[in-house]
Image (cartoon, helix red, strand yellow):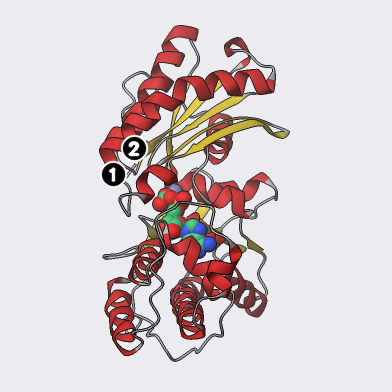
Amino acid sequence: MLVLGIETSCDDTGLALVDENGLVASVMASQVPIHALFGGVVPELASREHARLIGPLFDRLLQESGKSLQHIDRIAVTRGPGLLGSLLVGVSFAKTLSLAADIPLIGINHLHAHLLAAGLENEIPFPALGVLVSGGHTHLIRMDSPVDMHVLGKTLDDAAGEACDKFGKMLGLPYPGGMYLDKLGQLGDVDKHLFPRPYIKNETYDFSFSGMKTAAALWLEQHKNAGLHLPPLGKEYAEEFFENAPSETKNGAASYLYAVADTLVIKARRAIKEFPAACIIVAGGVAANSFVRRRFAEFAREMRLPLYIPQNKFCSDNGIMVAYTGLLLAKSGLCHDDTLTAVPRGRI
Ligand code: KG4
Ligand code: ZN
């Protein structure tokens, strides 16, 4: 079964073809250089870019894979959560193809797709504890099977990615700050006591990362020379920008990221005590963070559980995870009709 996956929930336009043997082909266009000029995603610009890019990207996908529309058995599309305008571009494109070529549609939950992407390269044992960490979401999810997931806890305010992006911005790093903060932090030393573990003195599995911002602002007050003020050039920064940064900035970045990672582990530990799992999955853009990867590797070793974190290239938004989730859902007999619509918020 050949499944087309379409991802347009935020600022990445991703399309991919996946079958039972894995990835067939994928194409992707990032809008980072556009949004970097504004220090964050501008929803109106994001949807316009998706609309401009999606047709040519689909043609390229067919060309590179040597497939045609007739070879596609299912069309899987992200229907939420995400930015309404961006989601609508993907959903409308998927519905058009579906109607034109009579191919069944499957609407995909973006968060589930991030987590299930871990199964692309591994056989995942269920139940699993899913730790979904992205720019807009931080969820602990009990995954009983690919089609049976339950949210145990989530952030009450900022997501882990937002906490990283905001500290990055405060330090003068370009958008998206989290990725650059990681580059800086890898050159620094961790002081485990420099930043707090927010919202842990309670019995819940929820998170609240907004307090990290305040702690970061206070730290910056006391380290006035830590700011970098790099121009918003987008992705390609020379390594020496980071190497030449003051050591207090590198150490601050390392300690902050460690605190974020440790907070995630504290709540994951609590969840796993209550809901024993056969493995831990960490996914979403922030799963690319080296501190998060390392901290969870330590935690999983301690718990004697297998840990699955997708390769960095599968952590950020992409069409592959959507196509793969579509394949799993199709195998379970799931399918939607043309009333499928975008669901920017809430339960899907
Ligand atoms: O999953 P994703 O690509 O998009 C959403 O669904 O939100 O996640 C994007 C988030 C951004 O906040 C970005 O800064 C963060 O993931 N991110 C990182 C790293 N790479 C991406 N945060 C920390 N360290 C990284 N290496
Ligand atoms: Zn995402």
Q: Quadrant of the N terminus?
A: top right
Left or right: 40 in relation to 68: left
Q: Residue at x 55, y 47 (%)?
A: 116
Residue located farthest toward the right when viewing the structure as drawn: 21
Q: Is residue 138 above or below residue 251?
A: above
| Residue 139 visible in the picture | no
Say which of 139 and 316 sits in front.
316
What type is the residue that disc 2 sits on?
A: Ala
Residue 249 percent location from the top left of the image: 46, 80
Q: Residue at x 37, y 31 (%)?
A: 49
Q: Quadrant of residue 110?
A: top left
Question: How many marks are shown on the rendered structure?
Answer: 2
Considering the numbered disc 2 on the image, is that residue within a helix, a strand or a loop? Answer: helix
Residue 179 percent location from the top left of the image: 49, 61
Left or right: 110 in relation to 68: left
Mark 2 to mark 1: distance in Å? Answer: 6 Å
Would you call the spot at circle 1 few (<14 residues within 10 Å), some (14-19), or many (20 or more)? some
Considering the numbered disc 1 on the image, is that residue within a helix, a strand or a loop? Answer: loop
Label placed on residue 229: none
Say which of 336 and 44 sits in front.
44
Residue 17 percent location from the top left of the image: 61, 28
Label 2–label 1 contact, CB within 8 A: yes
Label placed on residue 42: 1
Q: Is residue 209 above or below residue 87?
A: below
Say which of 203 and 260 sits in front.
260
Label placed on residue 46: 2
